[in-house]
Image (cartoon, rainbow, N blue to C red):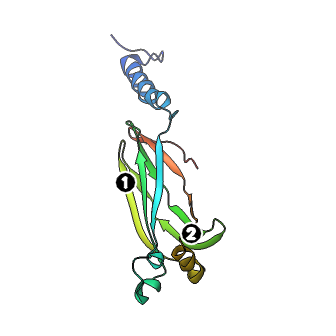
Amino acid sequence: MSEGGGGGGGCCRCCCSFIFTSGHRPLHVAKPTHLQTHLLHPRLLIPALNRSDNSTATRNNHTIRFDLKLDNGMKDKGVHYANISLTFFYNSTLPIANFTVPEFYQGHNKNTHRRALVDASGLPWTEARDAVANGSTLSFKVRLATRVKYKIMVWYTKRHS
């Protein structure tokens, strides 16, 4: 049985075509349609506003300690976060601190914490301490910006904002 120059390709061509087609099909079927990545409210601790410790060292501690929890509830997709930019605001309008969480990968069905200490500046500390001492509630806001891409098996999707 000689293969003529008719360009049939035979078994090898058929097998390669099957592998190529079946290898790409799961990527199209597994496109992320329902994404379940959750950012849980960041926990903030501001030592200078602690009413139970009135020492000079505590009052002069102008830092914010935060704990950012990210929960990936997707059982078949991992998440790659680009740098996470955090901006902290006092009374929702006055920016007081910035911080960048370096990029990282979070596996499927996992949660993670990112904790750090940032220096706050521009916050009217005396006014804020007096308000807390009088039993008032202060308003802080954290703005988060990042881009993510999802890992499905061994492939990554395009980035999403």
Type of residue at label 2?
Answer: Ser
Type of residue at label 1?
Answer: Thr
In which quarter of the view is residue 72 placed? top left
* Residue nearest the viewer, comparing 85 with 69: 69
Q: Residues within 10 Å of mark 2 (few under 14, many from 20)?
A: few
Indicate the secondary structure of the residue bearing disc 1: strand
Indicate which label's residue lies in the foreground, 1 or 2. 2
Of all residues, the one furthest to the left in this rendering is 1
Residue labelled with disc 2: 136
Q: Residues within 10 Å of mark 1 (few under 14, many from 20)?
A: few
Which numbered circle lies on residue 45?
none
Mark 1 to mark 2 CA distance (whole Å): 33 Å
- For the point 48% across and 15% down, the residue is 6
Q: Decide: is 10 above or below 144.
A: above
- For the point 43% across and 89% down, the residue is 56
Indicate the secondary structure of the residue bearing disc 2: loop
Q: Where residue 40 appears, x then y in whole percent?
A: 46, 52
Of all residues, the one furthest to the front in this rendering is 134
Which numbered circle lies on residue 112?
1
- For the point 43% across and 28% down, the residue is 26
Q: Is residue 121 visible?
A: no
